[in-house]
Amino acid sequence: MQQTIRILMTDDHPMIIEGYQNTLIATKKEDQDLIIDIANSCDESIKYMENAVSLNNPYDILFMDISLPPSSDGKYTSGEDLAKYARNIMPKAKIVILTMFNETYRIHNIVKAIDPEGFLIKSDLTSKELASAFQAVMSNPPFYSGTVNKIIRKTISTDIVLDEINRKIIYLLSQGVKTKSLSDHIDLSMSAIEKRKKYLKEVFEIEDGSDETLLFEARNKGFI
């Protein structure tokens, strides 16, 4: 019996999407019929999703690139926003995130916010891995690429537990944001931020008190 699988691919690089599409068509199982729609922007992706829902014919799987130009109304600024929207209007659809980002903080946030059935780092991606990911996501999700698995395992293996704000402080410091400017990015007073930094240095056992040593230890333990 043939299985029809409806797919929406969203990426602003047409050649990349063409590669994904050709790979899936070439490697699909004999009993799988693929119907693939392609969106090159947030606006196009939203239009496809809303049309599918209105016709009571939602997608089975959505491939979402994280880096996308914002929607025309500014409401959606990335594939992450689109994936969250898809979760609301098509809760049964499987979501596969594709991205060039490989920072621990970004990956941790995406896993927490979206819990995707597939998560692929583009630098890990080969045609064989994309084909394997597709079949795994359809039958036995999740499927995470090597870099994602490595980051998740490294974070889990440490006995240090950080809340979202402390993770963000470390991430911002690693991006070169100065302590005096952290309050521009985090809704906390300067004194509250200083207390959190002190706590972080205690948790990571930073004896010299420097931000550089804090970042070094945080990186070693998989938080950056």
Image (cartoon, rainbow, N blue to C red):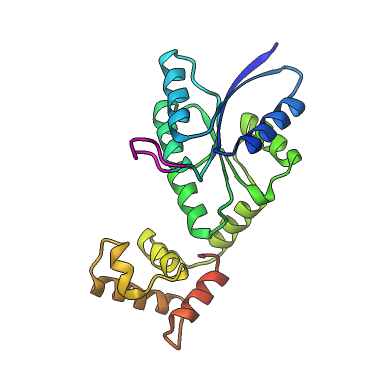
Check the image and report above or below for 195 versus 147. below
Between 37 and 3, the one nearer to me in the picture: 37
For the point 35% across and 78% down, which residue is it?
198
Check the image and report above or below for 32 versus 215. above
Q: Where is residue 52? Give x, y as percent.
A: 47, 18
Between 86 and 31, the one nearer to me in the picture: 86
Q: Where is residue 53? Give x, y as percent.
A: 43, 19
For the point 48% across and 40% down, which residue is it?
79
* 68 inside magenta stretch: no
Span colored in magenta: 69-77
Between 162 and 93, the one nearer to me in the picture: 93
Which image quarter is the N terminus in?
top right
Q: Which quadrant of the view contains residue 158? A: bottom right
* 74 inside magenta stretch: yes
Q: Where is residue 47? Give x, y as percent.
A: 43, 24
Q: Where is residue 212? Give x, y as percent.
A: 48, 80
For the point 65% across and 36% down, which residue is it?
15
Q: Which residue lies furthest to the bottom in this view?
A: 208
Q: Main secondary structure of the magenta part?
A: loop
State left or right for residue 36 relative to residue 200.
right
